[in-house]
Image (spheres, rainbow, N blue to C red):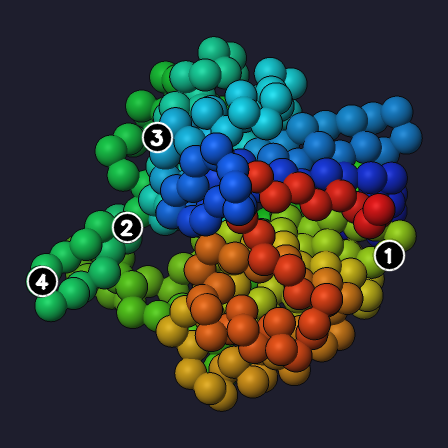
Amino acid sequence: MSLFQQMDYLDEVNITVLAEDTAGYDTSLTARFGLSMLLEARVEKNRTQFLYDTNQAAAPILENLKTLRLSIEELNSIFLSHCHFDHTGGLPGILDALHRPIPVLGHPSLFRPCFEMKPEGLWPIGLLGYSRDDLERKKASFILTQEPVRLMSGMITTGEIPRINDFELAGEMFTVADGKIVKDDLKDDAAVVLLLRAGLVILVGCCHAGIVNTIARAKEITGVAKVHAVVGGLHLLDADDNRLERTMGALDEVDLVFAGHCTGLKAAAMLLRRRGTGFSPIFTGRSIHFPLG
């Protein structure tokens, strides 16, 4: 049963990729490892502007906004898909640029230590350099919850995404719990779901929970079975053949896949070969408008 029994459809939404690993051909835009997307949505006369992730730095976002002749002066809120630096690192600079209080949505474990253990040593990968107090002094108003949050009519967050299959694993990342180093299962990984008449549009950051699990969660909280599009990073860089094949099969039900960042070249090639025009890469400066056309 849907957690939201009365959800209005979005009349239109425009998604602009403000900063991603790559930039489009023949452009002066700045690419930077990570992801940040600006959403501008409308339901009847109600409009909202919403920032999905903040890349690893604010500078490319702010520079690209100027180049694209866009503004975040009317930004309503910021959503952080998970704690990793390539999705949260730009937050301090964005807050400085706004000069006003703004809601920042995320998971209660957003500020936990998060790191990888590599042969050359420890590599911290969480929200780096700033504490919650630091960011609140910059006027961030944190809304940290495990549950879905309705951002506006036709737009909600997934909250925690249940891991219901055995092939979408989070990978070898670690955190600290009760004074011990433990595997980090990345429970904070979340997505944003848009409801359009064509079906659901699911926005993902790195999709550490797995796109198959994420799609299942989006259907659960909305009560809508039709998935029109997936937009963002699919984190299939290191996926084995079994996971790739099962993921591709699950995505067959989705009309359109717009993927980049951590998706990986092999997965992108499989998506293109399997889906043809049903797959399109995202890159810095890419704009996607729904309804299409």
Specify which label sits upstream in the sequence, 1 or 3.
Answer: 3
Tell me the number on the disc at residue 132: 3
Q: Residues within 10 Å of mark 1 (few under 14, many from 20)?
A: some
Residue at 36% across, 34% down: 57
Specify which label sits upstream in the sequence, 3 or 2.
Answer: 2
Q: Quadrant of residue 186?
A: bottom left
Which amino acid, mark 2? Answer: Ile
Q: How crowded is mark 3: few (under 14 residues within 10 Å), some or many (20 or more)?
A: some
Secondary structure under tag 4 reads loop
**Is residue 202 visible from the viewing direction of this image?**
yes
Which amino acid, mark 3? Answer: Arg
Residue at 67% across, 28% down: 49
Q: Do the residues labelled 3 and 2 touch (CB within 8 Å)?
A: no
Q: Are marks 1 and 3 in contact (CB under 8 Å)?
A: no
**Is residue 163 visible from the viewing direction of this image?**
no
- In the image, taking residue 221 as reference, residue 197 lies left or right, namely right
Residue at 16% across, 65% down: 118
Question: According to the image, label 4 marks what residue?
Answer: 120
Marks 1 and 2 sit apart, C-alpha to C-alpha, by 37 Å
Closer mark to the observer between disc 1 and disc 3 = 1
Which amino acid, mark 1? Answer: Ala
- In the image, taking residue 114 as reference, residue 104 lies left or right, namely right
Tell me the number on the disc at residue 198: 1
Marks 1 and 3 sit apart, C-alpha to C-alpha, by 39 Å
Give the image location of residue 125, x and y in percent: 28, 50
Specify which label sits upstream in the sequence, 4 or 2.
Answer: 4
Specify which label sits upstream in the sequence, 4 or 3.
Answer: 4
Q: Quadrant of residue 151?
A: top right
